Image: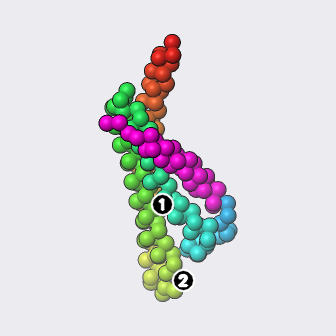
C-alpha cells in the first residue's frame, strides 16, 4: 500500500499543530486566575484560560495521534513490528488522554459549575465525587504514560532503522 504525498503533508501539519497544542497545555495555566482551596478549585471552571486549555487538551491527542500514525505508516516497510507496537502504544495514549479530558469536561466541570448553587448535602457528594475523579484521573494518566512510552520507544526504534538504511544507500 502506497500512501499519497498529501497524506504525509497532512500528518506533518498535525505534527506542527501537536507542538502548538503541547505549548498551550504547558503555558495556558500561567494565565489562570490564582485560587486557594477546594472552593477556588470549583470556581476555576469559569476561568477563560482554563476553558481554552480544557478544549485544547481534548483536541491534542487526536492531532498528535495522527502525526504518530504518519510516522508508523512511514516505517512499516522496514520495521513492521515496531510500527504496529508504536501505533498501538500511541492509540492507548490518545484514547486515555481523550477519555480523561472528556471525563473532565462533561462530568467534573458540570459538578464544579453546580457546586455553589447546591445545598450542603449535595456539596458533600460533590467533594466525594471530586476525590473519586482525582483517583480516576491519576489512573488514566498512569496508563497514558505507559502507552506514550511504548509508542515513542517503538516508533523511535523503527525510525532509526530508516536513518540507517538511508545512510547505507548513500555509501
As displayed, is residue 90 above or below residue 137?
above
State the CA–CA distance, disc 2 to disc 1: 26 Å
The answer to whether the residues at label 2 and label 1 have Cβ atoms under 8 Å apart is: no
**For this rendering, which residue is in front, 141 or 39?**
141
- Asked if one can make out residue 118 in the rendered structure from this viewpoint, the answer is yes
User: Which residue sits furthest left?
Assistant: 1
Residue shown at 52% from the left, 48% from the top: 13
**For this rendering, which residue is in front, 24 or 169?**
169
Q: Which quadrant: the N terminus? A: top left
User: Circle 2 sits in a helix, a strand or a loop, which is it?
Assistant: loop
Residue shown at 44% from the left, 82% from the top: 122
Q: Is residue 158 magenta?
A: no
Q: Is residue 19 magenta?
A: yes
Residue 98 position by quadrant: bottom left
What stretch of residues is rendered in magenta?
Answer: 1-29
Residue 5 position by quadrant: top left
> What numbered label is drawn on residue 58?
1
Q: Earlier in the sequence, mark 2 or mark 1?
A: 1
> What numbered label is drawn on residue 116?
2
> What numbered label is drawn on residue 25?
none
- Residue 23: percent from the left, percent from the top? 61, 52
Q: Is residue 104 left or right of residue 45?
A: left
Amino acid at each position: 500500500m502506497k500512501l499519497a504525498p498529501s497524506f504525509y503533508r497532512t500528518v506533518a501539519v498535525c505534527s506542527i499543530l501537536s507542538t502548538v497544542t503541547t505549548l498551550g497545555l504547558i503555558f495556558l495555566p500561567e494565565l489562570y486566575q490564582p485560587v486557594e482551596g477546594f472552593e477556588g478549585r470549583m470556581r476555576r471552571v469559569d476561568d477563560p484560560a482554563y476553558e481554552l486549555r480544557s478544549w485544547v487538551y481534548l483536541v491534542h491527542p487526536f492531532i498528535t495521534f495522527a502525526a504518530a500514525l504518519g510516522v508508523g505508516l512511514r516505517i512499516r516497510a522496514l520495521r513492521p513490528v515496531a510500527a504496529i507496537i508504536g501505533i498501538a502504544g500511541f492509540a492507548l495514549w490518545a484514547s486515555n488522554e481523550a477519555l480523561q479530558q472528556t471525563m473532565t469536561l462533561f462530568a467534573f466541570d458540570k459538578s464544579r459549575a453546580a457546586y455553589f448553587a447546591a445545598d450542603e448535602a449535595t456539596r458533600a457528594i460533590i467533594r466525594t465525587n471530586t476525590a473519586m475523579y482525582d483517583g480516576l484521573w491519576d489512573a488514566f494518566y498512569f496508563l497514558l504514560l505507559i502507552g506514550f512510552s511504548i509508542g515513542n520507544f517503538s516508533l523511535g526504534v523503527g525510525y532509526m532503522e530508516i536513518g540507517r538504511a538511508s545512510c547505507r544507500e548513500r555509501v
